[in-house]
Image (cartoon, rainbow, N blue to C red):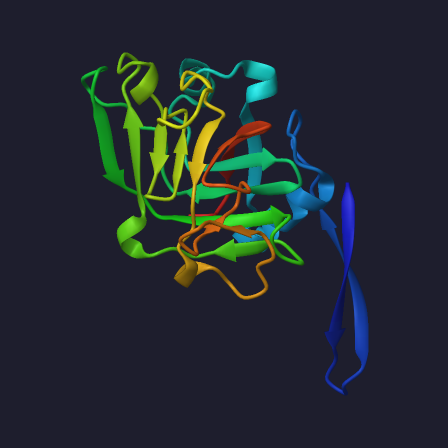
Amino acid sequence: MMTVSLTCVGAEGQQVRLRRVQVSPPGGTSLSAAEYEGLLDLMGNDNGTKLNSLYRTSVHGTTYGDLLDSVGDAEPLVFVIRKGKYVFGVFINCGLELPDDPTDWHKYDCDLWWFSLAGHFPEPTKIDIDRGDQWVAVAGRQRGARGAGVRIGWWLSLGLGHGDSDRPAADIRSCMQITGSRMVPEGYTGEWDEYGDAVLGGSDFFHADEIEVLHVMGNSR
């Protein structure tokens, strides 16, 4: 259990320090207490929002099927990705909706935004993205190793193969992530790619150390 101190100014300008009790991180999460607090602050934790950890690659397995089996039809979701010193991810106000044809894709609109918890900014930071890039595409379970995974907008792919990698695409930790320069908030100290876009994982294509998916409960919608 964590508490944080808040400073308020009274009617006569007097500063009054209040203590606000924070919920503890959910069981089984990879998030530290500080990371969990930072994420809740970005989501607006004064509205009763809580998170429940559904899936971690280090616990439940690293295949696309492991991800789908653990997440099920839960929504909304938060994806947390760890790569070295970087901790970042995305909130999606929807779930993982499989296509009717298990060999096909299902693409659908979904409200979403990026966040960084460590390695890019002095403090946890929300990254808003263009409305036209707010969509999710989910592959069917039988699509095949090089085409089975999840794509969140143009900016994140999980478990998708690419030509310059010797890592198996069947591993959901095989990732691609970029953030267009025009969407990057001030104060960014992370890496940039050759086109001037931010790469939250340290490079366009990377192998994540850990991926976690959490179910958002409360009034976050």
Q: Which residue is drawn at 23% across and 34% down?
A: 107
Image quarter (top left, top right, bottom left or bottom right) of the N terminus: top right
Q: Which residue is drawn at 47% across and 48% down?
A: 220
Where residue 138 appears, as percent x and y from the top left, is 30, 28
Relative to 181, residue 137 above or below: above
Q: Residue at x 40, y 19 (%)?
A: 169
Q: Which residue is drawn at 60% across and 35% down?
A: 83
Relative to 101, residue 151 above or below: below
- Dividing the picture into quadrants, the one containing residue 18 is bottom right
Is residue 195 or residue 67 the one in the foreground?
A: 195
Is residue 42 or residue 145 the one in the foreground?
A: 145
Where residue 166 appears, as percent x and y from the top left, is 45, 20
Is residue 171 or residue 165 the one in the foreground?
A: 165
* Residue 44, visible in the rendered structure: no
Is residue 152 or residue 40 the one in the foreground?
A: 152
From the viewer's perspective, tell me whether residue 206 is left or right of residue 190.
left
* Residue 21, visible in the rendered structure: yes
Count of numbered labels shown in the rendering:
0
From the viewer's perspective, tell me whether residue 213 is left or right of residue 25.
left
From the viewer's perspective, tell me whether residue 159 is left or right of residue 153.
right
Relative to 26, residue 22 above or below: below
Where residue 108 appears, as percent x and y from the top left, is 24, 38
Where residue 81 appears, as percent x and y from the top left, is 55, 35
